[in-house]
Image: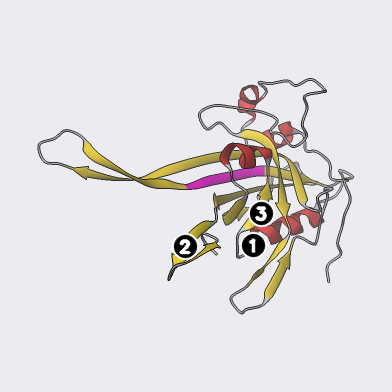
Amino acid sequence: MKNQIKGKFTPIVDPEIVLKGFGIQALKRTFYSTQLSAEEEDENAANLTSYLGTPVFSNIELIPGEYTDKNGDTVPYGEIFKNSENETFRIDTVLIDVSQEKQIIKTNIQGVSGSVKEYISKGDYQIKVRGALVDENGRRYPEEQATQLKEYLEVEATIGIASRFLNDIFDVSNIVIESFTFPQVEGFQNTQFFEFSAVSDDPIELTVLGNTFSEGASF
């Protein structure tokens, strides 16, 4: 059984490392737009705000849980590495992109310029998260953190996520992972960069034979 590691000893990643690791250091000036006094600082709040879909520095916490796999077995996750008071896996200084596409039916009418639009619904939020994992002593590869993140990203169900940016602004607290990458970058032996794409997964209500019950949208 894998060892469980706890304690608030995971270092905060320098934002410049994340920017350089993903080749987007030219965007730094866009990010640093707000400074808070000591009384106004909130460690759970997004560090930076932006407009028009510009990525935002924030932190995320992945919440442990369990799910039932295709064989009917219960699979727990999130117990390998915990580094927050909430017993979660917290990753500081990540870049988050959020987008949404509305579901609209467009019908062309002969002799009329343009089309008739019929609004159906809002689509899921498309979420892209980029960041870096760094070992606490800054000398070795962050194997425990990388292993834990990989476990979360391979979960075959909805996973809970805590993030002031996602929770408060977009009301997203559950996501489904669609894809992820762990790129190697020259010159960063003690750092593991990562990127994953996910979609929001809000609970929905279904009515069957007059009985109303709540069920996840995807699982």
Gap between marks 1 and 3, in whole Å?
14 Å
- Count how many numbered circles sit on residues in the image: 3
User: Mark 2, residues whose alpha carbon is within 10 Å: few (<14), some, or many (≥20)?
Assistant: few
Segment tinted magenta in the rendering? 124-130
Q: Residue at x 75, y 21 (%)?
A: 36
User: Mark 3, residues whose alpha carbon is within 10 Å: few (<14), some, or many (≥20)?
Assistant: some
Q: Residue at x 62, y 41 (%)?
A: 166
Give, as a three-letter code, the residue at label 3. Answer: Gly
Residue that carries the numbered disc 1 in the rendered image? 154
Mark 1, secondary structure of its residue? loop
**Image quarter of the N terminus:** bottom right
Q: In the rendered view, would you say 17 is above or below 86?
A: above
* Residue 81 sits in quarter: bottom right
Mark 3, secondary structure of its residue? strand
User: Mark 1, residues whose alpha carbon is within 10 Å: few (<14), some, or many (≥20)?
Assistant: some
* Near-viewer residue (174 or 146): 174
Q: In the rendered view, would you say 97 is above or below 37?
A: below
Residue that carries the numbered disc 2 in the rendered image? 206
* Residue 94 sits in quarter: top right
**Image quarter of the C terminus:** bottom right
Pointer 1 and pointer 3: residues touching (CB < 8 Å)? no
Query: Of discs 2 and 3, which sits in the foreground?
Result: 2
Q: In the rendered view, would you say 15 is above or below 83?
A: above
Q: Residue at x 63, y 38 (%)?
A: 168
* Residue 112 sits in quarter: top left
Residue 31: % across, % down: 64, 26
Residue 2: % across, % down: 83, 67
Residue at the left extreme, as displayed: 111
One can see residue 40 in this view: yes
Q: Residue at x 62, y 73 (%)?
A: 69
Residue that carries the numbered disc 3 in the rendered image? 160
**Magenta stretch holds residue 137:** no
